[in-house]
Image: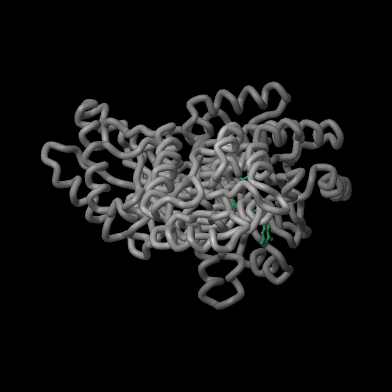
């Protein structure tokens, strides 16, 4: 502690409370060589100063007899208050009797008037401060046996003390984690794991000057650092990485570091490290990055995602997740005819409002929750097909999106078939959209699954075609029933002749494969006319309708029924 205070140029502050100016002056002279000194003329003033958040006192020297509020009353007040209690008090008195009473009221020591030699006073002040701070540290004093770094409790206690003397300084909170540490333990044994931790502790103490930075190991493979703000971390952590790489017979070790620079002193220290940890966690498994900085925006984004993950079950239960339907029209006849619909999820969050699938689908795809959500959508879609059938007497085929996670579920087929059976729906009526990028990832495994689905009668639409990297060669080997051109083609179609040629090329590919083409994202009539001219079969887009809730879809079916009657 002394080291830290010396290097940071900090001095403890003592409050001298005495109504006589001469006394204040004498004490001031004695103390100001070693301490910052504040003064109060009576108990009332002192009380006010003690409650100020910007001043932290290490000690109070208190006269007993004063106007306005005397020393006894102040001591009583301090005893009643939780926060003020933590300042030790030395009472200055010339009366023996007063000592007993003030001890009862919590004073730690006495200085008798007239004053002793200055050295004696100074020594007593020092001793009380040391004792007091020592006690509060000892309560939590414990070092981590393995690394010799502080224990977590001590670390945070230490931070509180540093902060009470040095609230103004810019400080950083750093969390360091050893990637895949459990693997090191499993593959090389615990003693090697322990050794890695020990070496890390040693290196940290060497690389970060203990005079301006403290460290602890809060749990197995995580280290916390709290130190004076620095702009540069790359180098020092590169050095740490280097040092550990040089250990002979040791596994490859990789650190992941999260930094919360210039911590906000208004929030509790534990939260600083939560923030740094959050930054650290967001680069888990990312081998291109070792350092990650906390920022408010990133944090909000993460919290928003966390919220969505937390809320998904309830959203399904409360039916805040609603399946919308967007019609697809066959356009090659005299007039456009309703062909089918795509089921698209919407989230009406009771507090966050409408959330777009673009926000939560990628998130749920990355953590596997998409499976739960897709299953819900399939159920809703199949139930809706049944209801339309009952209401209108015709079946409107619906396509649902199938994510890559679903594809590797060995029960995919079984679940889908059971769902259809329960609702009395055939595989003709439920089409499956699989995005192109899923094909390029694991084509062999995927082809097997898709073949099995097709054998059972499901039709597969290759979604977002042209957005990924599937080679033309691959197209001839993957089994599909419909090709869905990526929306971008349509958006750019009228921007240049080349772009239109590209759309024609996609349609040629579909012809070559012998499957119909769907154009997505068709918004105006000009696009429709061009697409009709160049032979596109089906169109989906705002030109006909945005995705709508099921009750708004009814009129599309009624219109189709009218057209059928006219035939
Ligand atoms: P997608 O499967 O390519 O779906 C088409 C997206 O284009 C939908 O966005 C749709 O609303 C939008 N769209 C349709 N016509 C037009 C148009 O004319 N102009 C424009 N600008 N956009 C149009 P949405 O509903 O926001 O869905 C975005 C993506 O989220 C979907 O892309 C799909 O990948 C995913 N998604 C939506 N619902 C589900 C679901 O239930 N399960 C899974 N796994 N993914 C879903
Ligand atoms: Ca789709
Ligand atoms: Ca699409």
Q: Residue at x 49, y 40 (%)?
A: 109
Instruction: State left or right for residue 460 relative to residue 331.
Output: left
Q: Residue at x 41, y 59 (%)?
A: 10
Q: Position of residue 106 (x, y in %)?
A: 57, 36
Residue closest to the eye, 137 or 368? 137
Choose top left, top right, bottom left or bottom right for residue 185.
Answer: top left
Q: Nearer the viewer, residue 149 or 224?
A: 149
**Residue 225 percent across, percent down from the top left:** 37, 48
Quadrant assignment, res 32: bottom left
Could you tell me residue 195's position as x and y percent?
20, 34
Vertical arrangement, residue 345 with respect to residue 491, above or below: above
Q: Is residue 103 left or right of residue 318?
A: left
Query: Taking 326 as reference, is 309 left or right?
Result: left
* Displayed quadrant of residue 544: bottom right
Question: In the depicted view, which residue is nearer to us: 408 or 348?
Answer: 348
Q: Nearer the viewer, residue 474 or 226?
A: 226
Residue ID at (57%, 32%): 100
């Amino acid at each position: 502690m002394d080291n830290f205070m010396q290097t940071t140029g900090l001095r403890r502050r003592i409050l001298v409370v005495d109504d006589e100016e001469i006394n204040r002056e004498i004490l001031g002279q004695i103390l100001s060589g070693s301490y910052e000194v504040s003064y109060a003329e009576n108990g009332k003033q002192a009380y006010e100063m003690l409650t100020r958040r910007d001043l932290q006192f290490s000690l109070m020297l208190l006269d007993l007899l004063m106007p306005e509020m005397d020393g006894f009353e102040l001591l009583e007040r301090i005893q009643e208050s939780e926060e003020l209690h933590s300042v030790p008090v030395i009472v200055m008195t010339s009366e023996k009797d007063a000592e007993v009473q003030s001890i009862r009221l919590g004073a730690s020591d006495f200085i008798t008037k007239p004053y002793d030699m200055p050295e004696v006073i100074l020594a007593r002040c020092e001793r009380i401060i040391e004792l007091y701070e020592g006690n509060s540290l000892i309560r939590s004093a414990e070092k981590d046996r393995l690394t010799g770094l502080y224990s977590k409790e001590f670390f945070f206690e230490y931070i509180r003390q540093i902060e009470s003397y040095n609230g103004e300084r810019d400080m950083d909170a750093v969390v360091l984690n050893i990637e895949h540490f459990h693997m090191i333990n499993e593959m090389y044994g615990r003693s090697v794991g322990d050794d890695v931790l020990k070496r890390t502790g040693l290196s940290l103490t060497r690389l970060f000057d203990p005079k301006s930075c403290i460290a602890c190991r809060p749990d197995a493979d995580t280290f916390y650092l709290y130190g004076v703000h620095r702009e540069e971390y790359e180098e020092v952590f590169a050095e740490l990485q280097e040092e550990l790489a040089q250990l002979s017979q040791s596994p490859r070790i990789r650190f992941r570091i999260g930094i919360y620079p210039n911590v906000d002193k208004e929030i509790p220290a534990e939260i600083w490290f939560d923030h740094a940890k959050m930054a650290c966690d967001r680069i888990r498994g990312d081998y291109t990055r070792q350092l990650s900085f906390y920022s408010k925006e990133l944090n909000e984004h993460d919290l928003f995602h966390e919220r969505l993950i937390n809320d998904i079950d309830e959203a399904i239960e409360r039916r805040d997740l609603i399946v919308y339907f967007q019609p697809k029209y066959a356009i090659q006849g005299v007039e456009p005819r309703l062909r089918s619909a795509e089921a698209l999820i919407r989230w009406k969050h009771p507090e966050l409002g409408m959330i777009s699938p673009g926000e939560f689908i990628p998130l749920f795809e990355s953590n596997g929750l998409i499976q739960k959500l897709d299953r819900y959508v399939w159920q809703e879609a199949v139930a809706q097909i049944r209801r339309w059938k009952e209401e209108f007497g015709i079946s409107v085929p619906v396509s649902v999106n199938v994510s890559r996670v679903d594809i590797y579920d060995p029960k995919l087929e079984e679940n889908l078939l059971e769902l259809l059976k329960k609702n009395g729906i055939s595989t003709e009526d439920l089409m499956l959209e699989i995005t192109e990028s899923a094909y390029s990832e694991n084509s062999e495994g995927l082809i097997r699954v898709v073949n099995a689905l097709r054998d059972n009668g499901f039709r597969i639409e290759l979604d977002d075609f042209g957005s990924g990297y599937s080679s033309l060669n691959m197209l001839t080997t993957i089994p599909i029933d419909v090709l869905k051109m990526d929306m971008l083609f349509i958006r750019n179609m009228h921007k240049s002749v080349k772009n239109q040629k590209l759309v024609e090329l996609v349609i040629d590919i579909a012809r070559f494969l012998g499957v119909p083409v769907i154009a997505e994202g068709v918004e105006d009539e000009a696009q429709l006319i061009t697409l009709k001219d160049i032979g596109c079969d089906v169109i989906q887009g705002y030109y006909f309708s945005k995705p709508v809730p099921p009750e708004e879809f009814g009129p599309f079916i009624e219109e189709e029924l009218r057209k059928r009657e006219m035939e």
